[in-house]
Image (tube, coloured by chain):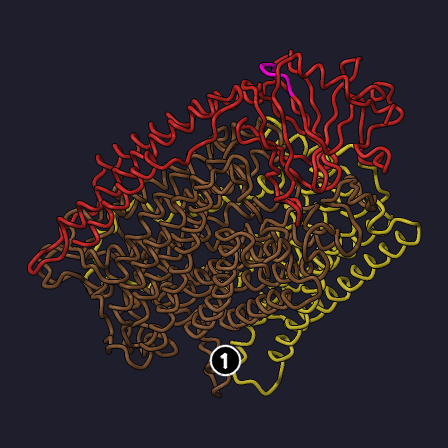
Amino acid sequence: MLVALMMVLVVVGSIVFHFLSPWWFPPLASNWGYIDDTTVLTFAITGAVFAAVVLFMAYCLYRFRHKEGNKATYEPENRRLEVWLISLTTGGVIAMLAPGLFVWAQFISVPDDAMEVEVIGQQWLWNYRLPGEDGRLGAADNRFVTFDNPLGISPHDPAGQDDLVVIGSDLYLPVDRPIRFALRSVDVLHNFYVPEFRAKMDMIPGSSTYFWATPTKVGTYEILCAELCGVGHSYMRGIVHVVTQEEYDDWLVLQRTFAEF
Amino acid sequence: MANIPHDATNTAPPAELGEMELYHPKSWWTKYVFSQDAKIIAIQYAVTALAIGFVALVLSWLIRLQLGFPNTFTFIDAERYYQFITMHGMIMVVYLLTALFLGGFGNYLIPLMVGARDMVFPYANMLSYWIYLLAVLVLVASFFVPGGPTGAGWTLYPPQAITSGTPGDEGGIILMLVSLILFIIGFTMGGLNYTVTVLQARTRGMTLMRMPLTVWGIFVATIMALLAFPALFVAAVMMLFDKLLGTSFFMPTLVEFGEQLSYGGGSPILFQHLFWFFGHPEVYIVALPAFGIVSDLISTHARRNIFGYRMMVWAIVIIGALSFVVWAHHMYVSGMHPYFGFWFATTTLIIAVPTAIKVYNWVLTLWRADIHFTTPMLFALGFIVTFVNGGLSGLFLGNVVVDVPLSDTMFVVAHFHMVMGIAPILVIYGAIYHWYPKVTGRMLSEALGKFHFWVTFVGAYLIFFPMHYVGLMGAPRRYFETSDIMVLPDSAITLNAFMSIAAFVVGFAQMVFIFNVVWSLKNGKEAGGNPWRATTLEWQTPKTPPEHGNWGKELPIVYRWAYDYSVPGAPEDFVPQNQPAAATQGAPS
Amino acid sequence: MSAILIFLTVLALGAGWWLSRQGLTVKPWLQVDHAGTVADPGPSRHSPAQLGLGLFLAVVGSLFALLISAYIIRAEAGDWRGFPLPWIVWANTLTLLAASLALEWARSAAQRGALAVARTGVIAGSGAALLFVTGQLVAWASLTESGYDISSGPAGSFFYLMTAAHGLHVVGGIFALGRTLGHIRRADQDNLGWQERKEQAGLVRISVDLAATYWLFMLFVWVVLLLVLSGWAGAFLALCGQILSGSGLT
């Protein structure tokens, strides 16, 4: 039967595609291996369910196709079967949700020793601010944004004077240090997304959001904006270099402070 | 479960409403144009929705031209690209799917399936269509204003929806919002009609538990839409105020291209809450009618009662209720309070359970059935595959932490096209092949129908299944240009070209469908009253197509549920709902 | 989103209670009736128009609950400043109350069939409603004059938005009252036959009943809006929001 055959082909084709195609997550470069694990677990469970449901359906289509003199069975419901299926489904859902929530709890608790890096989005480029010698970032607000102060750092907050300001050029991060990305935007919504880090978060004008990650692999990665931000959205790219601590320190001394800007 | 003693008089409404008078059309105009007959209104809704849907289909080709062959078709610049994706999304979700399921199928099927003569408020029903048409025209008009239609994405997130970095930020966005407001007003008129008709105009004996699942699906979806659309309405009005009157509901202090705008203090997240408070129920507003219709298609063409009818009804009601407390799963990476993630991931995955039950019951209906591979059945089967696929990928996106890398990537695009694009549209086609004989008195060509099905089903699967992996690789959605993304290998470009070609082929198959619908009007095989040998009331009308008033002199009386297929001992493999129990034999048990 | 969730919870409880009486646990395949055994249950308790109005009010209610939700979310931001409600809105509340009372009076008169009294009630109600709308416009004018226009602050923006939304519903209601008066006039003609008179009286009864229900609801919405806008409801609803969500879902 053509229909049953096609259903089998859909299942087999999808599974073969999944395993044989070269297309998958880009190599992980952060601590979020758990996210990959949860994703793989979800693939396994949902893949099995998909195959089971469609193959069972294909069997029914083949076995119970209309033939002269056939008559369907009259069976309005089967409570035992339904209870079984509900329990199994609930089990599968818990198997996916529980690890997911567990990892989410980690995702939202930033380690105490995390280094703060502020990312400020604007149409359509990436800017950064790093704490200066006092180790903290000064206050900022979009009200203060001017040509000379593109990140809106408060001129009244002494803590902000020594902040390092990086406008539109590459970001450097030290490898193996947890980093708290504080996110702001001066105009519209943006989203800071490095595929290799797995993590991402929207940036909202008027408030500050955050996520954290520990880059674990030295290398150069592309930053993509992942929230539609106007006509230049797909050109809003940046580069982040994950480097050793020494290289990072070398880069850091080259940066200008807000006071010098 | 306690078996409540049956007393049809308890729950059944009166057979005929005393005050209900049919409006009798006096001229050609009031009969076919400004008609108050739900069946005519249904056809008007359906034709309008399909026409504007065709525009959205063409837009999807243009989108795929750019994605598959970047920088080849220079007339598609970034500005136009964003306008195309915005209009494609908005038209498909609101103006095609919602309007067609509720305005089209709701209007045609509710009165016929519950044994009513018409909707209870025919005049409001007529107004509903004309306001919908006006909304569509306003939407179309936005293509012709300076700056073109809005390119803010169908989610219209502020601030960018009304700031100058987005195409169509002047006339386009205003017309978009006005059109949505009109749509909601028009829909509310229709929606009140559908609900009250189901509640009060059911014929004698038609208890709630004897209603076909189609009516259940449309009924619950309508109630959800009535309560969810106000959220979009409020959001649209507030955004209009921000745009036109200088308020700052959604607009924080911001500096665009060096210019300090006069806004301050508003909350972009507030818009997202309002939008998704509508937007998530909207998914089920489209899905529930599809669930209901597909249940009836499968049951009829497999000649077997729908398996687990009660569970199906409860699942529809439970899904409808739960869908109001999951909205923020669209906002996991929006920067809202991170603790919300726990709550919304849990509620979202709970919805998977009743939804899975429905899938099991469709498939179990096929067990020991007598399956006829008619065109409507093929579409229903195609729906199961795409819906299961899309539903399962929803488990990735609903599970908050798995959503983090996938959110705002092509994986999301693949997911929602599979689950609320392709799946409901397959149901719409199945339903059109199924009910066209009732609407026109003629069958659609089965050969063309099967061709249409295979190309659409296989082609759509080939477009959207690989698309998940493009997202997995890291390609964000709404990118005008993806070919130069560092993480994407060159092979992804080839894959994109492949998906585009598949999209053109699928699009071509829709022309075959349009041809079939037009050609069969005159040349289709005579259908007779009940070509599928179905049990539900709409197939038992005295005339086909049914006349104004549906039932001739006397309303039908309902004696049994809607799924008496292959009843042991019955002479035929179906027993219509309006056929009383045989004098000699009791009910099958 | 606490306000809308509370509103929908109330609706869901009502719907659940209704559904629980609809025999949703019966096994419909076991119930096959014999010819002649399906009785006519008689006319239902509510006319379609009454049920339709009830549903419409649920939709309108969710609209205002959403506006209130938005107000609460916005009011939590740091830059929220209070907003002086013009004194006239309190006087307007009294005129709306008067409109509603007049229509309740008309409702009971229409039930008795006292058409003249009903007409007086509806006319009085329309007059009070017009006075309310005028009063609201005066409130707007006085605010604009004292420098609070729609874009001068978030509280003011919400005041204008909410009063406009409510005012439009009131204006719609006034048009409906015009239709009700039309019904009364037709029912009150001398040249009607007995049957016709009875039918027309039934229409009047339903029409006045719908009007009175609608205006009661408009009064209720207005009072709630006033409590929210004046800040009295703010503390209370915020508390509800915290209880409902556990983590301040507003």
Label 1 is found on which chain of the structure?
B
Where residue B250 appears, as percent x and y from the top left, is 71, 44
User: Who's brown, chain-wise?
Assistant: B
Where residue C34 appears, as percent x and y from the top left, is 19, 61
Instruction: State the residue in front, C28 or B406.
Output: B406
User: Who's red, chain-wise?
Assistant: A
Q: Quadrant of residue B430?
A: bottom left
Residue C51 visible to an observer of this rendering: no
**Would you say residue B491 sits in the magenta stretch?**
no
Q: Specify few, some or many for label 1: CA neighbours under 10 Å numbering under 14, 14-19, or 20 or more.
A: some
For chain C, the rendered hue is: yellow
Furthest residue in direction right, as rendered: C146
Task: For mark 1, give the secondary structure.
Answer: helix
What residue is shown at x 43% (from left), y 60% (from top)?
Answer: B101
Quadrant (top left/top right/bottom left/bottom right) for the N terminus of chain B? top left
Where residue B195 appears, as percent x and y from the top left, is 46, 59
What residue is shown at x 17% (from left), y 45% (from top)?
Answer: A59
Where residue B308 appears, as percent x and y from the top left, is 26, 45
What is the magenta range?
Answer: A173-178
Instruction: State the residue in front, B419 or B357.
Output: B419
Furthest residue in direction left, as rendered: A69
